[in-house]
């Protein structure tokens, strides 16, 4: 089993990475492979061109297309972002908009957690933004003992946030438990729910 943790910070090894690394360490302790993917390198927002629906890849060829290949074989995900003006980073927003347009079917029914790092405030607003992506895509949500956030202005400060780091470890434990439950279900012949054709109600009459 493998979990991909997406780091939506422009800083590859900053505070968000520190939080995700703590989650990854707990998953590794449970025998689950992990990869931390730098999603903060997304170069453009979604153009709304529809290219991905016809070609299975985004027209902008950057880290989103690389991630879209990886999610096919992954079993679970963690999306992490720093707080920028009480919201996810612009790079992470662009990344998630485009990834979910390109590869949503390959992520359905796979567990997902979201987390954020901040110096002081804006974390809950950011979590509310991030959680909307898996919620709309039939992905089981992995929670912890508190809101999934860490505080600190540097990686060293984040590591001093004992409650935040414990929250990250519990995400890892809960993710590992859920993945193993799903695997046991597969072995017992329990299959994923069948996807219904999507209905779209028009409000224009």
Image: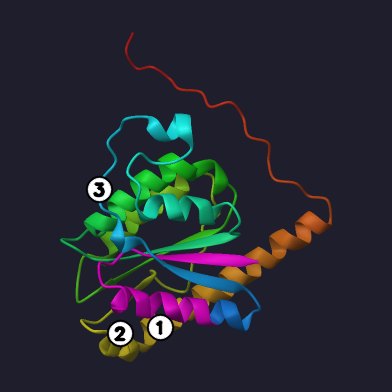
Contact check, label 2 and label 1, Cβ < 8 Å: yes
Which residue has dot 1 on it? 165
Counting other residues with Cα less than 10 Å from the Cα at mark 2, is it few (<14), some (14-19), or many (20 or more)? Answer: many
**Which stretch appears magenta?**
1-25
* Residue furthest left as drawn: 85
In which image quadrant can residue 158 be found? bottom left
Q: CA distance from mark 2 to mark 3?
A: 29 Å
Determine the residue positioned at 64% across, 79% down: 30
Determine the residue positioned at 48% across, 50% down: 68
Sequence-wise first label, 2 or 3:
3
Mark number displayed over residue 44? 3
Above or below, comparing residue 134 to residue 194 in the picture:
below
Q: Is residue 74 left or right of residue 49?
A: right
Above or below, comparing residue 26 to residue 102 in the picture:
below
Q: Is residue 18 magenta?
A: yes
Residue 160: give x, y in percent of width and height. 31, 91
Q: Is residue 70 magenta?
A: no
Sequence-wise first label, 3 or 1:
3
Q: Describe the element under mark 3 as helix, strand or loop.
A: loop
Q: CA distance from mark 3 to mark 1?
A: 32 Å
Q: CA distance from mark 2 to mark 1?
A: 8 Å
Above or below, comparing residue 99 to residue 50 in the picture:
below
Determine the residue positioned at 49% across, 43% down: 104
Contact check, label 2 and label 3, Cβ < 8 Å: no
Contact check, label 3 and label 1, Cβ < 8 Å: no
Most foreground residue, 19 or 60:
60
Mark number displayed over residue 158? 2
Residue depth check, mark 2 versus mark 3: number of the one nearer the observer: 3
């Amino acid at each position: 089993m493998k979990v991909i943790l997406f780091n939506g910070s422009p800083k590859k090894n900053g505070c968000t990475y520190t939080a995700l690394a703590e989650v990854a360490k707990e998953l590794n302790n449970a025998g689950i492979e992990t990869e931390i993917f730098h999603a903060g390198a997304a170069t453009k927002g979604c153009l709304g061109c529809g290219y991905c629906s016809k070609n299975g890849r985004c027209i902008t060829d950057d880290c989103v297309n690389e991630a879209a290949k990886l999610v096919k074989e992954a079993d679970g995900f963690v999306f992490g972002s720093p707080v920028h003006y009480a919201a996810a980073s612009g790079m992470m927003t662009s990344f998630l908009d485009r990834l979910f347009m390109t590869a949503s079917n390959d992520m359905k029914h796979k567990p997902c957690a979201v987390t954020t790092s901040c110096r002081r405030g804006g974390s809950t607003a950011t979590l509310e933004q991030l959680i909307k992506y898996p919620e709309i895509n039939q992905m089981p949500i992995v929670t912890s003992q508190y809101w999934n956030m860490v505080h600190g202005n540097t990686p060293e400060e984040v590591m001093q946030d004992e409650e935040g780091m414990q929250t990250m470890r519990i995400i890892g434990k809960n993710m590992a438990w859920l993945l193993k439950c799903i695997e046991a279900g597969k072995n017992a012949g329990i299959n994923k729910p069948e996807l219904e054709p999507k209905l779209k109600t028009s409000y224009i009459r």
